[in-house]
Amino acid sequence: GAVVSQHPSWVICKSGTSVKIECRSLDFQATTMFWYRQFPKQSLMLMATSNEGSKATYEQGVEKDKFLINHASLTLSTLTVTSAHPEDSSFYICSAARQGNTIYFGEGSWLTVV
Amino acid sequence: DAKTTQPPSMDCAEGRAANLPCNHSTISGNEYVYWYRQIHSQGPQYIIHGLKNNETNEMASLIITEDRKSSTLILPHATLRDTAVYYCIVTDTGTASKLTFGTGTRLQVTL
């Protein structure tokens, strides 16, 4: 069964609004989670590293004020896309490392901005 | 992290073994080889990983050459549900959670 869960699976929002995506580790604690974005027919691109109890680390070119990451507990990280625009429409995926260095991914969240 | 090279696509007949190659000629001593697959519109699924010894689990086998410069993922009896993009990723244990994805191999399993 799934060890990392995302919610919602898909969301449609209006341009200019904000949307939050949750990533939960099931049955294990994850001090670090990762957020990826994937555009159609492209590979996954790492956006940021989410650290429990501290600020996220963003990859070059990713706007930290637009993609807000909060990792308030050892089992939950959230990604908020602020002032979303159509070009933010994408597949967002999170991952977390379970004990033993095996990294598991969530099911992904489809965001469509209209 | 070491870079990997994979063929962009492969076909395999259902029931046959699928052998997916990966080159990682710049791999360093502390780097593992991980394999994931992504079925359309889903998050990547962990398959297997190894350091230098061959590994086998319920999903697949991983064969790593003695010089560790290449590896092969083997799906022993491919089914239609194995159709996916397969990613070979090399990363060290210190950053094992941070995976950099290449373009992968699109495996098409056919009847």
Image (tube, rainbow, N blue to C red):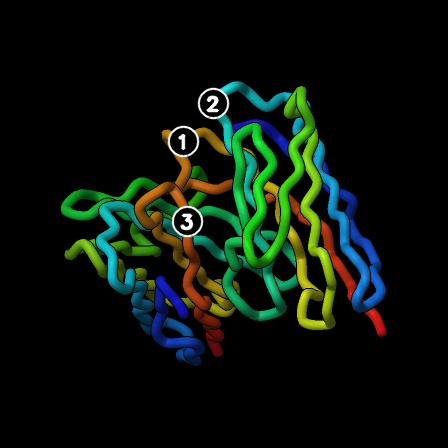
Subunit ID for the residue under disc 2: B
Few, some or many residues within 10 Å of mark 2 (<14, 14–19, 20+): few
Residue located 42% across and 40% down the image: B98
Vertical side of B41 occupied by A38: above or below: above
Q: Amino acid at mark 1?
A: Thr
State the mark number for residue B93.
1
The residue carrying mark 2 is: B30
The residue carrying mark 3 is: A103
Q: Amino acid at mark 2?
A: Asn
Q: Position of residue A58 (x, y in %)?
A: 35, 42
Q: Nearer the viewer, residue A13 or B37?
A: B37
Same chain letter for marks 2 and 1 = yes
Describe the element under mark 3 as helix, strand or loop.
strand
Tell me whether circle 2 and circle 1 mark residues in contact (CB < 8 Å): yes
Describe the element under mark 2 as helix, strand or loop.
loop
Q: Amino acid at mark 3?
A: Ile
